[in-house]
Image (cartoon, rainbow, N blue to C red):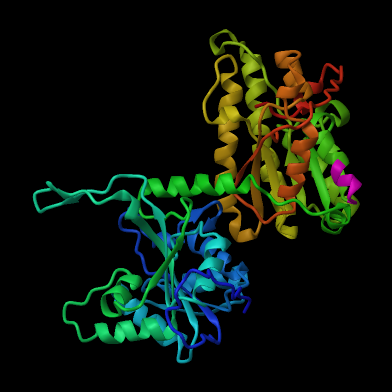
Amino acid sequence: MTQDQTTDPGTTPAERAPWRPSRTVAVVLAGGTGTRLGLGIPKQLLKIAGKPIIEHTLAVFEAAPEIDEIIVLMATGHVAEAQKIVDKAGFRKVTKVIEGGDTRNATTRVALDAVGEGDCNILFHDAVRPLLSGRIVRECVNALWTYAAVDVAIPSADTIVQVDENDCITDIPVRATLRRGQTPQAFRSGTIREAYRRAEGDPNFAATDDCGVVLRYLPETPIKVIDGSDENIKVTHPVDVHLADKLFQLAAAKVPRLTDHRAYSEEVSGRTIVVFGGSYGIGHDLTELARSYGAQVFPFSRSSTGTHVERPEDVEAALRTAFEATGRIDHVVVTAGILEKGALAEMDQETIDRVLQVNFVGPVTVARQALPYLQQTKGQLLLYTSSSYTRGRADYALYSATKAALVNLTQALADEWAESGVRVNIINPERTATPMRTKAFGAEPEHTLLAAETVAQSSLDVLISDLTGQVIDVRRPPGEAPVAVAVPTQTDRSASAAPVG
């Protein structure tokens, strides 16, 4: 158990006897039924960002060095499903997956029995708060060296009003003293046990909040409040599902990079990567970058190999070439795309068909053909979208529409392929210096464009990550030097260029 025993010198210890816990246990409360979401399954089993919500939550505690053990209190009738998630994810710290009680206080008692006797730290956390940060876990555990009870809360941005039975305001508390409670709530085991022991003698006892039990029945015990975060939301209502998914997307944009060339070589060397659209732009730069780290990369495009991504026979031939040469395919990347400007009403049918075929049918075709290969390696399919996917742009409506469709395709396939261990992600770069963009928009100020090399680097980081179902935004860092734009002159370059923002 790794814990920082430093404390704030201005605090007052809740107990003068030295606290020496034997371990720190995270109790994940997963008893919700999803009623308010209108689901047929418990909300903690709903998938967000390619994984069940509870899996995201458990992963936080699994990765936290301060946590020694995890116990899951699952909704009645769904223990087997939760256990399957634990087993598949390989969570080593999870020691029990058991049914919770009929009420919150009954569930806490079940948890205390499961923890067993002996002095330990206990953290209670809502399973449907999947965006919990390691920082909050660490600060909760550290605070228990000084305090016997710890809560997590954030300031209220809204004015809070108190009303009567007629919904008329009776009081407006001072907002500066108010906080919005979150979880985890952390306790020294003896403190929470004693609070519940005293509560058993109260016929009116009904708990929805464990810190509230301590406050009511052990009023002499200080409860330390540490800062939560706005991202640590509880998925309760339908809108929360969309908010959580978007927050995961924003978090995914910060894909950690490895430290040096050697680290990348250790990760990438020996992998086989197939790049459709690998002749120019992002596809070309990704090919060169991955090769520099020892990957075996097979680039295909209309101009260099005569490969049309919308033709199943071309795609299958390309994949077969890579597989026969190396015996595996770890990653399939599709940067191929075309951008034709002009009003939709004035566009001829041939152009419309070409845009739809290359930009959407192509990735669908690649996905279908690549799946059997990626299943063998538990690999990843990587697609590319554009910032226009969130709002269609005039004069390139079809391009915007197909890029939005690819985002939806990514999220759907990540869900469909999760059981096979195949990951699917999509890169969303801002305006990037590529041949396709130059062809469509002409010369632009260099300092306003993202370098294709930067997108290639982010693409490689995503390929070696565990992400799935994510839209990864790639933005030009503030102060980045102007990019050097080298534009090939081949007339066939548009079908193998990278997307624009």
Observer able to see residue 321: no
In the picture shown, does residue 32 fall above or below 106?
A: above
In the picture shown, does residue 258 fall above or below 72?
A: above
Q: Quadrant of the N terminus?
A: bottom right
* Residue stretch rendered in magenta on the structure: 289-294
Observer able to see residue 70: yes
Residue 174 drawn at (x, y percent):
28, 50
Residue 102 drawn at (x, y percent):
29, 75
Q: Residue furthest left?
A: 166
Residue 299 shown left or right of residue 374 in the figure: right
Query: Residue 244 versus residue 483: which sits nearer the camera?
Result: 483
Residue 110 drawn at (x, y percent):
37, 82
Residue 93 drawn at (x, y percent):
59, 77
Query: Residue 13 versus residue 171: which sits nearer the camera?
Result: 13
Q: Residue furthest top?
A: 346
Residue 52 belongs to the span the image colors magenta: no
Query: Residue 487 versus residue 88: which sits nearer the camera?
Result: 487
Residue 292 belongs to the span the image colors magenta: yes
Q: Quadrant of the C terminus?
A: top right
- Residue ID at (58%, 27%): 388
